[in-house]
Amino acid sequence: MNFLYTKREVVDKLNEITSSAENIVFEFKRDIDGEHLQIDINDSNAQEDYLIDYISIIHSINEVPFRKRIIVNRKIIANQDDYTLDLNLSNCEFKNQLVLFGKEFKGRVDFNYSVFNEINFSYSIFHEKTTFQHCIFDNLVDFYNTTFNNLVDFYYSTFKCSVQFHLTDFKNITVFSRVTFEQELQFLYNNISTESTKVSFENATFNRCIDISRSNFYCILNFWSSTIKIDSIIEELGESQFYKTDNGKLQSKTEKGNDVYHILRESIRIIKHSFKESNNVIESLRYQ
């Protein structure tokens, strides 16, 4: 295979940012999808903001006729306040923390096909299209007070950990279609732009507790062909970290005296109502 860019040329391009690019390990791998370039970023000398630039530059070399898989072992805590250009952080495996706290993303952001150990986007603002398609979220996800002003798409991703979208603002189309939530899911006091805004959970799978009772989802909701394992949810409510106190009541975020069953009942009522609003009476009957 003839590559238009050699390993040496890629390193030279990275050296335009920092002289420590020699510490990046390049290795060709072959899997069922063919040959791809695995790039192991374990650079102890590079500043953390440079690691994001590494990834963007590697992806920008579009002439290279092979897939790129980027392994990031270092913790990334970005110091840059805002990102004005499009950002490509796709096909990455972040083995440590990725902290983009309080950042402003003015261009498109692409995280597709990435694996996250721990991520923190608290207080960040995404102005343009943001995609998390086919991603895996392993251990910790923090979208507290995050704002998505444009489309945000989690299509076919898997949340292996509990996730809470607390004070998260969805100002445009929001896609959770074919997403698998292996643990608890909670939407709390969200800001939806207009009644015409759409939030889609089409073909999504919910294996544990789901709480949208205080989500403020006054918008178009789509739960078509989704799977909610209600029996297992009821059995495990007492173990839920989002819903209980020592006596089995709710966390202090809600009025004391309401029990976890009220939360589940209200969430199911909202889902059932969404089916009736779309004249899908047959699916609504599953939630009698």
Image: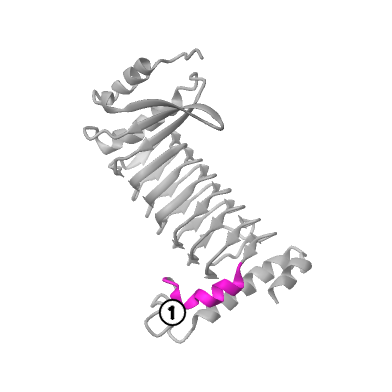
30 or 251, which lies in front?
30
Residue at (55% x, 64% y) in the render: 207
Q: In this view, which residue lies farthest toward the left?
A: 45
Neighbor class of circle 1 (other Cα within 10 Å; few <14, some 14-19, many 20+) is many
Q: Is residue 206 left or right of residue 50?
A: right
What residue is disc 1 on? 250
Magenta segment includes 239: yes
Rendering quarter of residue 74: top left
Above or below: residue 112 compared with residue 22: below
Image quadrant where one finds the C terminus: bottom right
For the residue labelled by badge 1, is the local secondary structure a helix, a strand or a loop? loop
Give the residues in magenta.
Answer: 229-241
Rendering quarter of residue 255: bottom left
Which percent across, then down, holds residue 205?
Answer: 60, 59
Magenta segment includes 132: no
Query: What coloring was used for the rendering?
Result: one colour
242 or 32, which lies in front?
32
Residue at (37% x, 82% y) in the render: 246
Above or below: residue 79 compared with residue 195: above
Above or below: residue 112 compared with residue 206: above
Residue at (32% x, 33% y) in the render: 41
Name the kind of residue labelled 1 in the image. Answer: Leu
Q: Is residue 283 left or right of residue 107?
A: right
Above or below: residue 25 compared with residue 106: above
Which percent across, then down, holds residue 224?
Answer: 69, 59
Which percent across, then down, holds residue 50?
Answer: 30, 33
